[in-house]
Image (cartoon, rainbow, N blue to C red):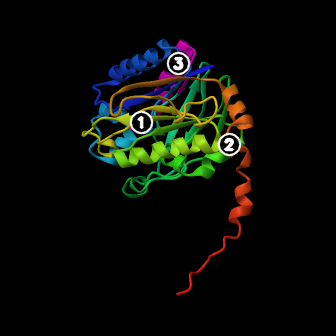
Amino acid sequence: MIRIAAAAYPIDQLADWAAYTEKLARWVGDAAGQGGDLIVFPEYGAMELAALDGAGSDREAAARAVAARKEAVDALHAELAAAHGVHILGASGPVWTAGAERPVNRATFYGPRGVIGHQDKQIMVPYERDPWNIVPGGPLHVFDTALGRIGVLICYDCEFPLLARALVDAGAQILLVPSATETRAGFSRVRIGAMARALENQCVTVQSPTVGPAAWCEPVEANTGRAAIYGPPDRGWPDDGVLAESDRDVPGWAIADVGLDAVQRVRAAGGVRTHEHWPEQEQRVATPVVTVRAG
């Protein structure tokens, strides 16, 4: 059994690095103290680091300020993961890869023994494309961990079913969905996407959003959502697919216990077999027939 903790995380205007380390240690300690094995932070939660350099009102300066602290952020997360014996998906933020002109949106995954790897966002929303000019990064990854095989779909990525299916076909049983949305409609799109991916693939999806205002930081000045953990609405799972959900726009945790054997059982003997029957779509969509109504 795995206990998953998904954060509904506020972007604070922190005074200095000490304030950031205290906040992160408190959040990780709180989740670990509640038995969390897998702790998930949101998309662009790392933007709060821009405050440490007085950046925020200028999106380019904010991105560069966050990227400049990546090495220190990695060391801090690795230290906390080791201290608590947990796995952590860190909050994503802009990262410039070697020789790149523009940054990717990267979430790094940490385990008790250090950095496991990272996942870059695959498909950018309009604001990331223009005016921010954040670019797609490296390929999709499946992390084979002591907790099971885990994939990451950053926010908008979870609205594209084929990305999720590629991870599931590579063995992922849990899909982490860190998100940052400024409107209720935006949050709903990601939430619906996460729930649909759990239904289609008969797996677990975990949404961790940013919440609350951050008027000082232009790229993430408004944030709305709720943390949640979803499964397929089928035998052995909640009828609505919701394993846990936090209050909307309230900082805190959504926590649920998940047995990966339940994923295998529902795939083998659920009321439906969406995971197994997925390939049958291919022959059905190959040659659609257009019927034109006379008159």
Q: As drawn, which residue projects farthest toward the bottom?
A: 295
Q: Is 279 drawn above or below residue 215 in the view shown?
A: below
The numbered mark at residue 79 is none
Q: Please provide the residue range marked out in magenta.
A: 66-88
Q: Residue at x 62, y 45 (%)?
A: 200
Crowding near the residue tagged with mark 1, few <14, some 14–19, many ≥20 C-alpha atoms within 10 Å: many
Main secondary structure of the magenta stretch: helix
Residue identified by numbered label 3: 36
Q: Is residue 72 magenta?
A: yes
Q: Amino acid at mark 1?
A: Pro
Do labels 2 and 1 touch, CB within 8 Å? no
Residue underneath mark 1 = 209
Going from N to C along the chain, the mark reached first, 2 or 1, is 1
Q: Looking at the image, do the residues carrying marks 1 and 3 touch, with CB atoms under 8 Å apart?
A: no
Q: 236 or 186: which is nearer to us?
A: 236
Say which label, 3 or 2, has the lower sequence index: 3
Q: Is residue 25 above or below residue 180?
A: above
Identify which amino acid the numbered label 3 is placed on.
Answer: Gly
Q: Position of residue 55 (x, y in %)?
A: 29, 39
At x 63%, y 36%, the residue is 203
182 left or right, relative to 99: left
> In the image, what residue type sits under mark 2?
Val
Q: Residue at (43%, 15%) from the top-left corner?
A: 30
207 lies above or below 259: below
Q: Secondary structure at mark 1?
A: strand
Using residue 222 as the reference point, say whether residue 279 is left or right of it: right
Report which residue position mark 2 lands on: 272
Q: Residue 146 placed where, x, y %?
A: 68, 22
Q: Is residue 97 visible?
A: no
* Alpha-carbon span between mark 3 and mark 2: 31 Å
